[in-house]
């Protein structure tokens, strides 16, 4: 009988503790962002991984040499590097150049192994986080721009 009464008072005490915490949350200022109503006011963190991008300079040149290391290290095949062979006019040697760099946002796990393993630092993360689409095919993007070429390495 004593344990029964003790359990009742213990239950009431824990209920009061929960109600106290709830009342504190009613008083505290709100931290919820009203997205998408405040779309222009939401600024993600600098370190956020939104989507993979390949930066190009003013001359439409990128750093990717089509080595394929990012494609090999990608755990689920999100990246496809399609290269083609070209002959260099100056030396006459054949070399592999980037034809298309395909990135599937829909299957990306945002693990960042591709950016870490890239020896040229040709790809990086942007803060763009809006990926809502009606069809999955629109989530497949080509990162290199049309007519782009590999940037010449700077000599130090």
Image: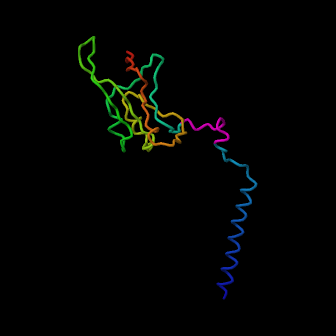
Say whether residue 123 is left or right of residue 86: right
In this view, 37 is above or below 90:
below
Residue furthest to the bottom: 1
In the image, what residue occupies the spot 69% across and 65% down? 18
Position of 140 relative to 19 (above/below)? above
Q: Identify the magenta region.
A: 36-46
Residue 42: image location, x then y, percent: 63, 38
Residue at left 37%, top 44%? Answer: 76
5, above or below 156, in the image: below
Examine the image and state in which quarter residue 147 appears. top left
Report whether residue 82 is seen: yes
**Residue occupying the point 37% across, 17% down:** 152
Can residue 156 be seen? no
Q: Is residue 81 left or right of residue 136?
A: left
Image location (x, y in percent) of residue 69: 33, 34
Principal secondary structure, stretch drawn in magenta: loop
For the C terminus, which image quadrant?
Answer: top left
Q: For residue 73, which quarter of the picture?
A: top left
Q: Position of residue 87 (x, y in %)?
A: 26, 17
């Amino acid at each position: 009988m004593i344990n029964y009464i003790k359990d009742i008072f213990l239950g009431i005490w824990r209920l009061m503790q929960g109600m106290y915490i709830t009342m504190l949350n009613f008083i505290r200022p709100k931290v919820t962002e009203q997205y998408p109503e405040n779309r222009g006011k939401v600024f993600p963190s600098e370190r956020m991984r939104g989507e993979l991008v390949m930066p190009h300079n003013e001359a439409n040149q990128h750093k990717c040499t089509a080595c394929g290391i990012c494609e090999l290290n990608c755990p689920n095949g999100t990246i496809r590097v399609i290269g083609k062979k070209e002959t260099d006019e100056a030396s006459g040697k054949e070399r592999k150049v980037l034809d298309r760099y395909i990135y599937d946002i829909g299957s990306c796990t945002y693990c960042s192994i591709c950016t870490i393993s890239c020896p040229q630092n040709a790809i990086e993360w942007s803060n763009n986080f809006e990926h809502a689409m009606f069809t999955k095919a629109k989530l497949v993007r080509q990162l290199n721009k049309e007519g782009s070429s590999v940037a010449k390495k700077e000599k130090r």
